[in-house]
Image (spheres, rainbow, N blue to C red):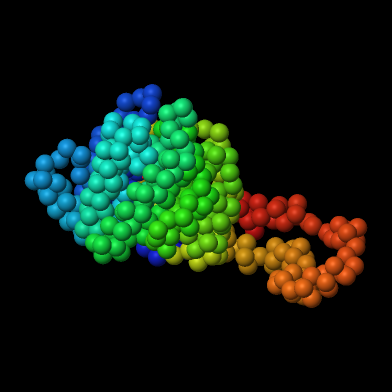
Amino acid sequence: MADALTPTKQQKFTFGLWTVGNIGRDPFGEPTRQGLNPAQIVDLLGQCEGTYGVNFHDNDLIPIDATPAQAAQIKKDFKKALRDNGLVVSMATTNLFSDPVFKDGAFTSNNASIRAYAVQKCMRAMELGAEMGAKMFVFWGGREGVESDATKCPVEAIKRFREAIDFLCEYSISQKFGYKFAFEAKPNEPRGHIYFAVTGSYLALIPTLAHPEMCGVNPEVAHEHMAGLNFVHQVAAALEQKKLFHIDLNDQEFGRYDQDFRFGSANPKHAFFLVKLLEDSGYSGARQFDAHAYRQSDYEDVKEFARGSMRTYMILKEKARRWNADKEIQGLLKQINVEEQLLSKLVRRFSPGNAKKLLNTELDRKRLAQAPLPYEKLDQLTMEVLMGIR
Ligand code: DIG
Ligand code: MN
Ligand code: MN
């Protein structure tokens, strides 16, 4: 029976093939799950009500050493599974991090031939994504970094990255793929230090690109948490610049390796404010769960991981609706936001006259400091909404 917590395609919930297809390998342990082929992964997602789409790295779909005949069969089976399950391909990306050739970076490699190979590999991945209908292309520079800064000039690395992106923007335009590019930051792992460590790094880069209008960001919860940052504020910066092109939802304990936990499973309060921001702002892009089930889970539990990710989002969406409708909370918001029309008008637009008026305005800092700020009450009410008693 569908209710307000039932996920629908309207939310554009998506999963990468590598997420529900994760086989449980970690740096200290072998796989705990049998691998599934792309069509089987799509069939699994088809059993998770509310799934809108699936995403892939080039080599999640077509193994790097597949023959043309094998590639053709895989694509045929994948397209059939998409049709059978009513799923779309929402985003495509390139694996520029697994193959040993990228051990010292892809776009920022010290070897010009490897840089060229990385661009070539992206071109082919863009073609594959376009064939499957993707209109968003993500770049996660997981190997773009150093262990020692003796090995690479960080300024040169930025120039190399920009050169590759400018070329690929032109390629997308020339092929009429219609792609938007979304850059995904991460501070470390698998490199000791990754360039463009946080979402703000990419927001600063985009205006310097040849095609900034095509480029935005794909922030990931776990990655900003790894940098010890408030993820909601990074997303707000992207939204405010109209550069939130995609988002990777998951969860993460602070100060740990990239855990890619089920959405909302570690920090429900942060997840609440994130969902509230996305919903209040009318974000219309895809919501990808870039996460994976615990290593202990079998595929029945992997489906529960996918269903739980979507259900938690829907629960927090309902909590945000209740918070916005709560009269006591809204009354406190009214109280703490003190307007003063004349002063706001003065400061909103500079003019010599406004500057003179402002300088001649008596502002009593001691009286201003007395304004009540019942933040404990407001946060307690918020927690009570979250804990389900409001
Ligand atoms: C990891 O968080 C990265 C890669 O999985 C992929 O390139 C990107 C897609 O969202 N996220
Ligand atoms: Mn991650
Ligand atoms: Mn990601």
How many marks do you count on the picture? 0
Image point (51%, 45%), residue name:
198
Nearest the eye: 8 or 53: 53
Image point (31%, 34%), residue name:
111
Quadrant where the C terminus is found in the figure: bottom right
Would you say residue 49 is visible in this rendering?
Answer: no
Compared across the picture, whether 374 is left or right of 318 comes to right
Compared across the picture, whether 144 is left or right of 33 comes to right
Would you say residue 376 is visible in this rendering?
Answer: yes
Counting from the top left corner in percent of width and height, residue 173 is at 29, 62
- Quarter of the image for residue 135 reads bottom left
- Quarter of the image for residue 110 reads top left
Counting from the top left corner in percent of width and height, residue 159 is at 42, 45
Nearest the eye: 284 or 147: 147
Compared across the picture, whether 319 is left or right of 191 comes to right
In the orientation shown, which residue stands out farthest toward the top?
28
Image point (28%, 46%), residue name:
119
Image point (55%, 62%), residue name:
240
Q: Is residue 274 above or below residue 4?
A: above
Compared across the picture, whether 117 is left or right of 248 comes to left
Counting from the top left corner in percent of width and height, residue 314 is at 48, 58
